[in-house]
Amino acid sequence: MSPFPSENGVEGDDEREEEEDEEEEEEEEEEEEEEEEEPRLKYQRMGGSIPSLLSSEAASCIAVAERMIALGTYDGTIHILDFLGNQVKEFAAHSAAVNDLSFDIEGEYIGSCSDDGSVVINSLFTDEKLKFEYHRPMKAIALDPDYARKTSRRFVAGGLAGHLYFNTKKWLGYSDQVLHSGEGPIHAVKWRTSLIAWANDAGVKVYDAANDQRITFIERPRGSPHPEILLPHLFWQDDTLLVIGWGTYVKIAAIRANLNKGANGTYRHVTTSNMNQVDIVASFQTSYYISGIAPFGDALVVLAYIPGEEGGVKEFSSTIPSRQGNAQRPEVRIVTWNNDELATDALPVHGFEHYKAKDYSLAHGPFSGSSYAGGQWAAGDEPIYYIVSPKDVVIAKPRDAEDHIAWLLQHGWHEKALAAVEAGQGRSELLDEVGSRYLDHLIVERKYAEAASLCPKLLRGSATAWERWVFHFAHLRQLPVLVPYIPTENPRLRDTVYEVALVALATNPSFHKDLFSTVKSWPPIIYSALPVISAIEPQLNSSSMTDALKEALAELYVIDGQYGKAFSLYADLMKPDIFDFIEKHNLHDSIREKVVQLMMLDCKHAVSLLIQNRDMITPSEVVSQLLSAGNKCDSRYFLHLYLHSLFEVSPHAGRDFHDMQVELYAEYDPKMLLPFLRSSQHYTLEKAYEICVRRDLLREQVFILGRMGNSKQALAVIINEIGDIEEAVEFVTMQHDDDLWEELIQQCLHKPEMVGVLLEHTVGNLDPLYIVNMVPNGLEIPRLRDRLVKIVTDYRTETSLRHGCNDILKADCVNLLVKYYKEAKRAVCLSNEEDDARSKRDASRASLAIEKTPSVRNMEVKSKTRGGGRCCMCFDPFSIQNVSVVVFFCCHAYHTTCLMDSTYTNSSKKGTGVTSQQLYGYDDDGEDDEVDDNDSQAGGPRMRCILCTTAAS
């Protein structure tokens, strides 16, 4: 298995066959080539009351106002519906089929015409109803847009009689004016502002009701089916733009009606030359019959009827398709003025197989506000289209952003759908749906890494969604690719989610490094470390254990408070900061089993740590671990560092290893061997000597031989191998052996240079004349004269120094004796409260006497004229009667009983003490005091001052 995860997730868990891959790639290429265009409209059947109405009746026509819909049927009934299809009102206006319906602009009146020859106008909000009889089938009607606002109550209507009636209310009632006749039946009529457009067999004419003049005539397209077979369709795009759909032709005429307006908006007289003011701005032929036409912004919506085929060639004749049930579905096509098709949708209308082209009709809701004046709908006021067949009403609306997103999702373009939602199109709630479907799509495509990277953006702050997808990835064994994106706050998930994620990383060696970084980055409070530890510990001694997993496990131990186990792993991993970790968590007792690792990591720091904690981990344990390390490290060098530091701190702590230490010094630090040999008493001399001989350490051999008592052999090594006579002299001097001096002289007699050096260094140690007398006659000694002069000079200097030192010693003795004598002659006064006056007098007398002898005063250190009047042992005053007192020349006084209890004596004491009232002394210069030596002569014991141990006289 590759150590790196694949681009789409974890390898080995999800595989596909090569054949399937090739087939899918081919299918994707074909789909790209035949990329489907997004429809412009969305469709739905009208509900509400429509299904029940059309189950028993058949729809014949429809009209749409801003607030309602009017539906005419073949039985002469008019149904007023809301936009959901619920019936609001019903008018039984006619006895035959309703052919056309028309609302005024306010939507307050509905006009209808029928094959029964009548025109009926109903008020939608009152009981007002007008009915006009024309005795011939009426096919088209149009109310004045201002019908509700004007009292003239005008409308136009026409039918099979070929007359276009202009009905107006006057003083005497309603009257009809025939605007046009004689060119066949009136098939359609539309009224916009003051312009009235109608279609008959000859073509389309436009009349200006405000000016009472006909404006233009547009000829019927040549070759188009007869109007009785395929009706013409008219609508006003705006106040001057008329769109005509007739048979297979579309014409768009621009009426220049503004040429007829005066300066104040009034209409002026129009001459005959100004009548034909029309421009055909667009004209094209279609490959289908036009069953209805309506505006779609700058384009057109056309209800297309596809004629039948005979012999593979479409027939565009005046005949209609047969009614044998082979008609095709009607189509809604959006085309530009240049006949470029923008979208085509086939409608599954009920019973379409049996319908003719004129059985269908198309109506659209009027635009509100400024939308009337440009053909464009305002935002939020998009037009609604109604496709009517005898048994069905289909609503078509422009697709909004949510429809666009749904279409993208339906066709698998999830990325585009997500981009559309992020761009602010549609409701914000769509992001959850789009995100969920996008993730499902990526999972199906096995693009796990891409799906994981999108989760933060798609799932956002939904904890429930995050948890669902975490467990879904875990079920697919792809959770490691999602772990880097799992949130730790906003939202914070359940503890179990984080634990499952960490375990998933731990079970795959490819993600062990990710596990360590995740444990370091995630806050410990969001999960419990113990379940993760339990999942990792079985891998400790397996082949899947990696250093990264050990690091992660150590971090988990720290989080769980198991610092000892964490230390063990850190030691195995040779972490540089392990010593700080030991001090931080006081893990000194845990270093017992990790001596080798610590030494390998930082031997100096480790040695210091082991020395400081030698009570917890003994030197024998350290030595045994280092010796058992084998080839893992330079264990002998580590032993040397440890034992050397141990010896410096405590020379006897490692005494069991001093033999080893001799060899280690000889190997790693020979300069320190001799000081060690001199300081230690715990090594074997024979072994140490063998090591020194083997490594040719001469001075160390000399020292060991000297300690072994082989002084002569040691001297021979110094003279013969080292060749340092000064060192030989020093060695002999330290031995204090006269025979060794003889040996040294004998060894040097045959070497003139050594004899000379020996003469230079014998002053103070040996008589130079003795050496000179032993020198063989004729032996040439280099620089003998200079050396003899030096010997004599050194001897004189030494003699002079000795005499000077003796004189100084004698003078010091005399001075100290005089000082001691003066101190001994000093009187000691012991007094109590009754003798204060006398004590002061004696003290002043003594001070006068001292002033008379300045030389003696200069030799005194302190005045000791008073004893304080208290025992130096029990601190009781001496005023107590009948108690003996002992006073020393150091001015310390004791009760005899106190002194006897504290003094060691060999026999019974002969009391010499007197009471404080009887003992006084005077200092008389020039008089000799008699010394009472009775006690000394009698051989009695001498008492000493306990405080200063000065002998009592």
Image (cartoon, rainbow, N blue to C red):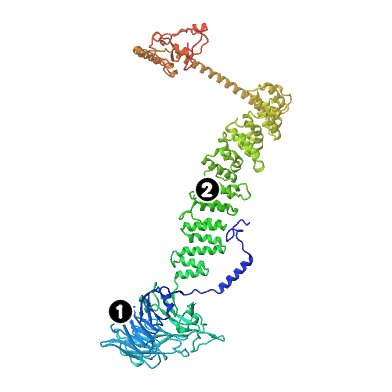
Residue 791 drawn at (x, y percent): 64, 25
Q: What element carries label 1?
A: loop
Does the image show residue 545? yes
Residue at the disc numbered 1: 127
Residue 817 drawn at (x, y percent): 49, 15
Residue 726, by quadrant, is top right
Which amino acid lies under the numbered mark 2 shown in the image of this protein? Ala
Sequence-wise first label, 1 or 2: 1
Q: Is mark 2 on a helix, strand or loop?
A: helix
Residue 718, by quadrant, is top right
Residue at the disc numbered 2: 529
Q: How crowded is mark 2: few (under 14 residues within 10 Å), some or many (20 or more)?
A: many
Can you say which quadrant of the picture contains the N terminus? bottom right
Q: Nearer the viewer, mark 1 or mark 2?
A: 1
Location of residue 650 with respect to 553 vertically, above or below: above
Residue closest to the eye, 764 or 308: 308
The single residue placed furthest to the front in the displayed view is 56
Does the image show residue 783? no
Q: Residues within 10 Å of mark 1 (few under 14, many from 20)?
A: few
Which amino acid lies under the numbered mark 1 shown in the image of this protein? Asp
Residue 363, by quadrant, is bottom left
The single residue placed furthest to the bottom in the displayed view is 182
